[in-house]
Amino acid sequence: MELSILFTGKSPKYIEIYQEVKHLILHKKLLAHEQLPSKRALAQTLTISVHTVKEAYDQLLTEGYIYSKERAGYFIAPFEIDWLQQKQQPASMPEVVTANNIQFDFNNGHVDNEAFPYTTWYKLIKKHFMKDHLTISPWQGEDTLRLEIARYVERSRGVTCEASQVFIYSGTQSQFLALCHFFGPKACVGLEEPGFKRIRAVLQQCGLSTMAIPVDHAGVTIPQKNIHLLYTTPAHQFPLGMIMTMERRAALLHWASLSQAYIIEDDYDAEFRYKGLPIPSLAKLDQLQHVIYFGTFSKTLLPSLRISYMVLPTSLVASFTAFYLEQKSVVSKVDQLVLADFMAQGLFDKHLAKMRTIYRKKQQALLTAISVHFSAEFQVIGEKSGLHIVIKLPNRLSEARAIQLAEEVGIHVYPCATSYQHKTSEAMVIIGYGGLTLQQINDGIARLASVWQ
């Protein structure tokens, strides 16, 4: 047998020999038990050293492409499977609306990026980006940030707690996952129906038992079966937007006390309330006996900052800390120090006051545009707080059709159906407005009306 190998000079010669022989084997140009040239013969043919050929053959031997017989030479190894690598054809993907086609994205997770205090934030980053701050934070979070958060939740939500009860995470899903592991695989968790689909996804990934707890006009209803945890969004139910009544809050806390269960109160956008007086949080009413309090900076600052926090009842702190003894921090130390400084200087409260004014104007622009461009058959739900509303569609327009029509005119709106664990006959869409300008809100709603109305 003769082997013709053209050296390119891109790799050592023994590697080029190895690669060429392997290629011939995989593509069945060399067959099982066929004999290769001897090391000396191939070296003479290619005008290279015997040692170079030996290195190539040794690599082929090691990987099992060839075998050797004493005093007989080298042979192609037999394979029981087909080694020929077929080029994979890309799977046909359904046509999707790309970002280039979308002019108005009513995403409830978007915020007003233009209003973020970039200059101040950059100065604080330069201040804290130093050699001593490039180590990892304690897994619970930086003490300075935990202290500022404890002060903030007390003055803003009436939740009295110590810094030791505050734990810093990189988002709601991250801290919820930590709780799932802590309570263990036998825990049964109740979720609002409809509710936050990403929380449901975490439970499914953990393999935990879940129970859909219906919501009504007063918020999540009282669980009728035994559960260990109940996740709820009382300040602005997601996605429907109702605010849990005081009567329901009291009943829910009474249930938790009798059942020895814990309520996870997610105050994801409680800072933005536009009508009526602030309603006390469950954590304030309960003073953190049976309530685990969730907060985030994704709505008040930037989603990309990836900083959230969890406040635990005192009774859980020691066991939770022991459980995560080997945990490491999941949030940048510099970002934590910057945020702590931003809060300590009173800059966060000033920023929050500014954003409340901005979002109030945007929400008013949205509601005005809907009233102008849509008839009364399109019902607005959940407009008293937060950064999104829900539009209940008339019977003639399905949720899927409404979303399709919106995309055809360059608009993204979002389904409510994905927030349900069980199928629903209601046709509703979620309209977020935090990331759009006043003009974009008006123009987008007018365009929606042109295809929905």
Image (cartoon, helix red, strand yellow):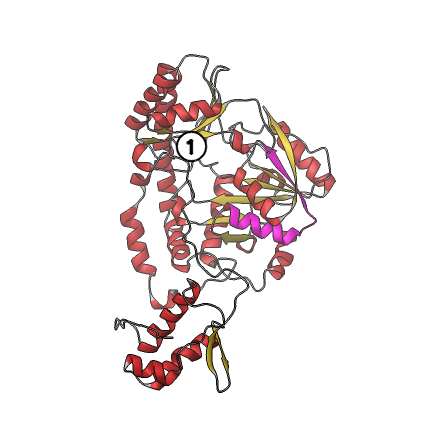
| 340 versus 133 height, above or below | above
Q: Nearer the viewer, residue 407 or 55?
A: 55
In the image, is 262 to the left or to the right of 376? right
Front position in the image: 239 or 244: 239
Residue 17 lies in the magenta stretch: no
* Residue at image point 46% right, 67% down: 31
Residue 164: x percent and y percent? 55, 56
Count of numbered labels shown in the rendering: 1
Percent across and percent down for residue 258 are 74, 39
The residue drawn where x is 32% and y is 56% is 125
> Left or right: where does residue 244 sit relative to residue 73?
right
Residue 190 inside the magenta-drawn segment: yes
Q: Relative to the observer, which residue lies in front, 250 or 125?
A: 125
- Residue 426 lies in quadrant: top right
Is residue 125 visible in this depiction of the protein? yes
Q: Is residue 267 positioned above or below 432 on the image?
A: below
Q: Which residue is mark 1?
A: 387
Residue 237 in view here: no
Check the picture and name the quadrant holding the C terminus. top left
Q: Which residues are magenta?
A: 173-193
Q: Residue 207: x, y in percent? A: 63, 47
Circle 1: element type: loop
Q: Residue at 29% of width from left, 49% of height from top?
A: 120
Closer to the camera, 325 or 71?
A: 71
- Quadrant that contains the N terminus: bottom left
Q: Position of residue 293 (x, y in %)?
A: 56, 44
